Image (cartoon, helix red, strand yellow):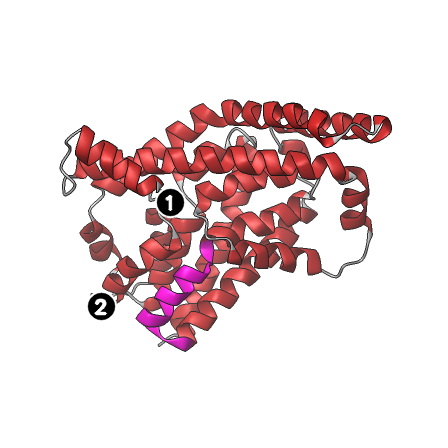
Amino acid sequence: MIQDFADWLVYGVFGLDASSHFGAAINFFIYDTIKILILLFLISAVMGIVNAYLPIDRLRNYLTTRKLYGFQYLLAALFGAITPFCSCSSIPLFIGFVKGGIPLGVTFAFLITSPLVNEVAVAVFLGAFGLKATLIYAISGIMLGVIGGWILGKFRLERYLSPWVQQIQAQSEVETAEWQSDKVPFLRRLPTIIKDAWGIVRGVLLYVLIGIGIGAVMHGYVPEGFFEEQLSVDKWYSVPLAVILAVPMYANAAGIVPVIQVFVAKGVPLGTAIAFMMAVVGLSIPEATMLKKAMTWRLIGVFFGTVALFIVVLGYMFNLFLV
């Protein structure tokens, strides 16, 4: 429905050419802006309802003090794998999880896996590359989320969350404590929950628009042939180069798989192509721009650096085993 509206507005009302770079970029910008803002508002409202009825401190203490042997990271990664979101669409859930008191490492496990693996991408990947490559891709994507979330959780990075997010956390805890002590009924809580959700949308609006704008330009104007030419030669540096070249791009996993199929057909090693795909969907300038509202640049750097390193390692492993 949102895509139909974007098509009608851009190609019908504005009269832009659907085959032009400018028309494709504007269509992408309008579609993704509406989608992400609606998603952000709905998720923020749902997390507000959850926070109103779930003891945040008890949940946080359970996840941080119990010996769950990493199961919490696996659960978050699996949840990320079944949610069909791109990296920027995953950010509203990331903010909601942090607001709800979920430990940062567990939240990162979701944020890493969600754009990398989903059922649509797996289906497309299966048809393009077969069962063996699909299993390796899906399992490695989930394990990347588990291991990456666990490592990032060990760094104790909560202090590098932005003051805005820390304020949201504190406000959520105070409201929940007051509602629980006063036994405020749901209908009286709802206006505050809606107001808080709208406040979150307003807080990230500028960052969302900038991030999606960058993604729209990349989506509409970057020629695919450029990447094929750079990555077609199997050199030792081809995998890290693929990751570096992918960061300015922005797409979801299902949308990038057909491009990867073209890369492989034109001589790009499969492992290098998968590393490029993972970096496109898991690391991007638009994603970093949106995350800036929730994280400091230092935390964004640690997150991107950790994930990029793992993707490079996986790319080399794929080139060894997927031949």
Give the image quarter of residue 10.
Answer: top left
Q: Residues within 10 Å of mark 2 (few under 14, many from 20)?
A: few
Name the main secondary structure of what is drawn in magenta: helix
Which residue is the site of mark 1? 247
The location of residue 231, given as percent across then percent down, is: 27, 58
The location of residue 250, given as percent across then percent down, is: 35, 44
Please state, as top left, top right, bottom left or bottom right, where the N terminus lies in the image.
Answer: top left
Tag 1, which secondary structure? loop
Kind of residue sitting beneath label 1: Val
Q: Residues within 10 Å of mark 1 (few under 14, many from 20)?
A: many
**Residue sitting at x 24%, y 52%:** 227
For the record, the magenta segment spans 116-131
The location of residue 271, given as percent across then percent down, is: 37, 66
Q: Nearer the viewer, residue 194 or 314?
A: 194
Q: Nearer the viewer, residue 317 or 186?
A: 186
Which residue is the site of mark 2? 265
**Residue sitting at x 37%, y 38%:** 32
Asked if labels 1 and 2 touch by Cβ distance under 8 angstroms, the answer is no
Q: Eyeballing the image, is 121 above or below 169?
A: below
The location of residue 247, given as percent across then percent down, is: 37, 45
**Residue sitting at x 51%, y 40%:** 91
Q: Is residue 190 visible?
A: yes
Kind of residue sitting beneath label 2: Ala
Tag 2, which secondary structure? helix
Q: Is residue 317 left or right of residue 173?
A: left
Please state, as top left, top right, bottom left or bottom right, where the C terminus lies in the image.
Answer: bottom left
Give the image quarter of residue 236.
Answer: bottom left
* Magenta stretch: includes residue 124: yes
